[in-house]
Image (cartoon, rainbow, N blue to C red):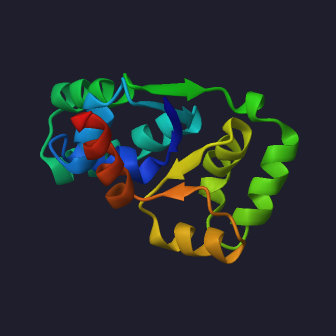
Amino acid sequence: MTKLVVDSNIIFSAILNVNSRIGQILLTSDNLYNFYAPKYVRDEIWGHQTKLKKIANLGDDKFLEVYELILKNITILDHSIAGKSNYKKAFELCKDVDHDDIPFVAFSLYLKCKLWTGDKKLIKGLKERHFEKIVTTNNLYVDFLNKSRK
């Protein structure tokens, strides 16, 4: 199975629309992909829950239901296991882009896998620094469809 680190913006998108391509991939491909995210993602989701609930028109109970549904297929990892050297590399890659993405890049380095993100600024910044372990939703959706047909 393919390992992928999932960025916060992907999870936010899935919460906002579970029927989207992102939602389909996260909810129905547990036999194709292993998804990972740093523990920090939970804080980020809870920190933005008011805005997410408003945009998606979700009450407290429905938000919690969707939150649990999305996160059940993502393995949440403690930050300490990624190691200082991966955090140092991730810091160098993200320092001029977005400090909030450091844990995601560190886990991508640690797990030796791609980072699934839709953050165009992050993608551009990482590619400028020759970090190519990125997958976009469009590319992943094509892979998902191909694997699902087999």
The C terminus lies in which quarter of the figure?
A: top left
Pinpoint residue 125: horizontal percent, then vertical percent: 62, 73
Q: Is residue 23 above or below residue 65?
A: below
**How many numbered circles does the render carry?**
0
**Residue at 46% from the left image edge and 71% from the top image edge:** 120
Residue 89 vs residue 43, the one in the foreground: 89
Q: Is residue 28 left or right of residue 104?
A: left
Please tell me in which quadrant of the rendered image residue 15 appears.
top left
Pinpoint residue 66: horizontal percent, then vertical percent: 23, 30
Q: Is residue 44 above or below residue 131?
A: above
Pinpoint residue 68: horizontal percent, then vertical percent: 31, 24
**Residue at 25% from the left image edge and 45% from the top image edge:** 145
Residue 148 vs residue 25, the one in the foreground: 148
Q: Is residue 75 above or below residue 87?
A: above
Pinpoint residue 16: horizontal percent, then vertical percent: 22, 47
**Residue at 21% from the left image edge and 30% from the top image edge:** 60
Q: Which residue reaches farthest front?
A: 150
Q: Is residue 58 left or right of residue 23?
A: left
Q: Is residue 46 left or right of residue 95?
A: left
**Residue at 22% from the left image edge and 24% from the top image edge:** 65
Residue 31 vs residue 100, the one in the foreground: 31
